[in-house]
Image: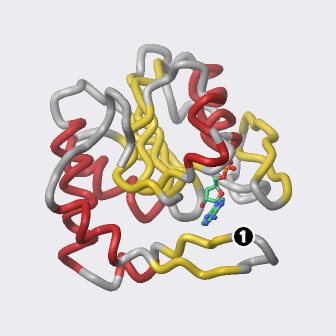
Amino acid sequence: MSETENEVKDPRIQGIKTKIRVVPDFPKKGIMFQDITTLLLDPKAFKDTIDLFVERYRDMNISVVAGIEARGFMFGPPIALAIGAKFVPLRKPKKLPGEIIFEEYELEYGSDRLEMQVGAVDSGDRALVVDDLIATGGTLCAAMNLLERAGAKVVECACVIELPELKGRERLEGKSLCVLVEYR
Ligand code: AMP
């Protein structure tokens, strides 16, 4: 759990933590892969995860939830529906038709880029960025840049898991980050 102002203290968190499977050396040697598919297999732990975020964001006037492909698509839409916000997918290259903007970023293993459709987000939108995990923070930075370039205000980023040793939080330059589980 995060030792920050955004710490979520709740008895449900321990149950969530036990459902995340850690797979050593996947997808390559040295990576401790945090597998959230085992969390999705447990309806109670999955619901608790969504509920904790919904309880936090329902009164924050969020107008758009932006989910990062692919695991942000598993947590973002149920949060968006529950808080009455639109959902905007931030996708890997060449998936979105029409006019797009993009940001390139570094991953813990490799590099990639995120794309967003022009017109999905309006200036004045209040955004929540959702992903499964923050490692180095590069993905969340790219997502925030896309939203801010479209004129949105990023209110907070929300991830199920943080890898604190990779210091991704420091890259967010003071932007709020809420995580449920820390893996050390
Ligand atoms: P980063 O940009 O370094 O913060 O990496 C975060 C993104 O990469 C997220 O979309 C994660 O799904 C994925 N990722 C990075 N490291 C891991 C890991 N150890 N286990 C699972 N997913 C990871």
- Residue 139 location in percent, x, y? 66, 44
- Residue at point 70% right, 41% down? 138
Ligand 1 neighbours mark 1 (CB distance < 8 Å): yes
Q: In this view of the protein, which residue sits in the foreground, 163 or 156?
A: 163
Visual colour scheme: secondary structure
Query: Would you say 122 lies left or right of 134 here?
Result: left
Q: How many marks?
A: 1
Q: Quadrant of residue 42?
A: bottom left
Residue 152 visible in rendering: yes
- Residue at point 41% right, 30% down? 156
- Residue at point 62% right, 48% down? 165
Amino acid type of the residue that numbered disc 1 sits on in the rendered structure: Ile
Residue 116 visible in rendering: no
Q: In this view of the protein, which residue sits in the foreground, 143 or 32?
A: 32
Q: Element under label 1?
A: loop
Query: Would you say 93 lies left or right of 143 here?
Result: right
- Residue at point 81% right, 52% down? 112
Residue pointed to by mark 1: 31
- Residue 176 location in percent, x, y? 43, 27
